[in-house]
Image (cartoon, rainbow, N blue to C red):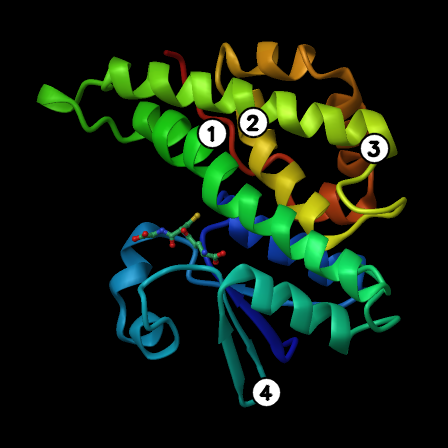
Amino acid sequence: MADLILYGMPHSNFVRACAMTALEKGATYAAALTGFRDMRSREMQAVSPFGKVPVMRHGDLVLFESLAIMRYMDLTFGDPDALQPADPLDRIRMDQWFNAVMGTVDRHVVREWALELAFSSGPDRTPDHKRIARAKKGAARDLAVLEREYARQGFLVGNAISLADILLVCTLDVLTLIDDGEALLDAAPALAMTMDGLRARDSWQQACRGKIAPNWSS
Ligand SMILES: N[C@@H](CCC(=O)N[C@@H](CS)C(=O)NCC(=O)O)C(=O)O
C-alpha cells in the first residue's frame, strides 16, 4: 500500500485538487474515508481538527487544508516546485488566486449552488431558489473575472499550470453537473479552453473523471 494517504470524498473539489496534484507529481496515493459518515469517525477526528477534508498523511506527517497539502506534494514528489511559480511575487499571486477560488468561486458554484440543489436547505428540503439565484449571479461575476485572466495569459499566473489552476478546474467542473451551469462556461471561451486542456491531462483523467454523475437541476 502507498505510504501517502488522502482522506476525503472522491467528489469533493478540494479532495480532487489534491489527488490531481499527487498524480501530476507522479505520486501514488491510497484513498481513505470516502463517505460523509466517515467524517465523524474516530479516525477522521484524529487527523482533521476542523472536521473537513481533504487530509493527507505521509508517514508520520499529517496535513489538512488543500493548499498546504498541495504545496507539500509539489515540494516532495517529482521535480520539486514544478507546480508553483519560481518568482516570489508570482507565488504570492498564485496564493491570491488560490484563495479567491477557495473562498469566493467555491462558495458560489459549489456550496451555495450545487450543494443547495443536492442537499436542499429550504422548507421541506426543497432548494432555496433565492439562495441559488444569488449564487448564480455571483458565479457569473466570478467567471467574467477569470475569463479576463485566461484570455490575457492562458493560466492564472504566468505561462504555466499552477496549484491555483488545478483547484479552479476541479471547482468549475462542478458546473458541468448542473443543467444550466454549462451555459456560464460557454460564455467564457478562454477559460473553457484552459479547462479542456487541464481535463485532458492524465492526472485529471485518473483523479476526477467518471466518479460522480448526479442529475442536479435548478
Ligand atoms: N479550506 C478547506 C476547505 C475544505 C472543505 O470545505 N471541505 C469540504 C468538502 S469539499 C468538507 O470537508 N465539508 C464537510 C463539512 O464542512 O462538514 C480546504 O482547502 O481544504
> In the displayed structure, would residue 138 be above or below residue 58?
above
* In the depicted structure, whether residue 25 falls above or below residue 202: below
Quadrant the C terminus occupies: top left
Q: Which residue is tagged 1? A: 109
Q: Earlier in the sequence, mark 2 or mark 3?
A: 2
Q: Which amino acid does label 3 sit on?
A: Gly
Front residue (pair 200, 134): 134
Q: Is residue 152 or residue 5 the one in the foreground?
A: 152
Mark 2 belongs to which amino acid? Asp
Quadrant of the image for the N terminus? bottom right
Q: Where is residue 21 in the image (x, y as percent from the top left)?
A: 71, 58
Question: Residue 99 location in percent, x, y?
Answer: 55, 50
- Asked if the residues shown at circle 2 and circle 3 are in contact, with their CB atoms under 8 angstroms apart, the answer is no
Secondary element at image label 2: helix
Q: Give the Cα distance between marks 4 and 3.
A: 33 Å
Q: What residue type is labelled 1?
A: Val
Residue at label 2?
Answer: 142
Number of the front mark, 1 or 2: 2
> Where is residue 120 drawn, in percent x and y?
24, 26
Are the two marked residues, 1 and 2, in contact with CB atoms closer than 8 angstroms? yes
Q: Which of marks 1 and 3 is in front?
A: 1
Q: Please tell me which residue lies in front, 23 or 146.
A: 146
Of the two numbered discs 1 and 3 on the same chain, state the one appearing first in sequence: 1
Relative to 121, 177 lies left or right: right
Q: Residue at x 62, y 51 (%)?
A: 96
The tag earlier along the polypeptide, 4 or 2, is 4
In the rendered image, which residue does mark 3 sit on? 197
Q: Which of marks 2 and 3 is in front?
A: 2
| 114 with respect to 60 (left or right) | left
Q: Of the residues under marks 4 and 1, which one precedes in the sequence?
A: 4
Q: Mark 4 points at which residue?
A: 59
- Residue at point 19%, 28% (across, down): 121
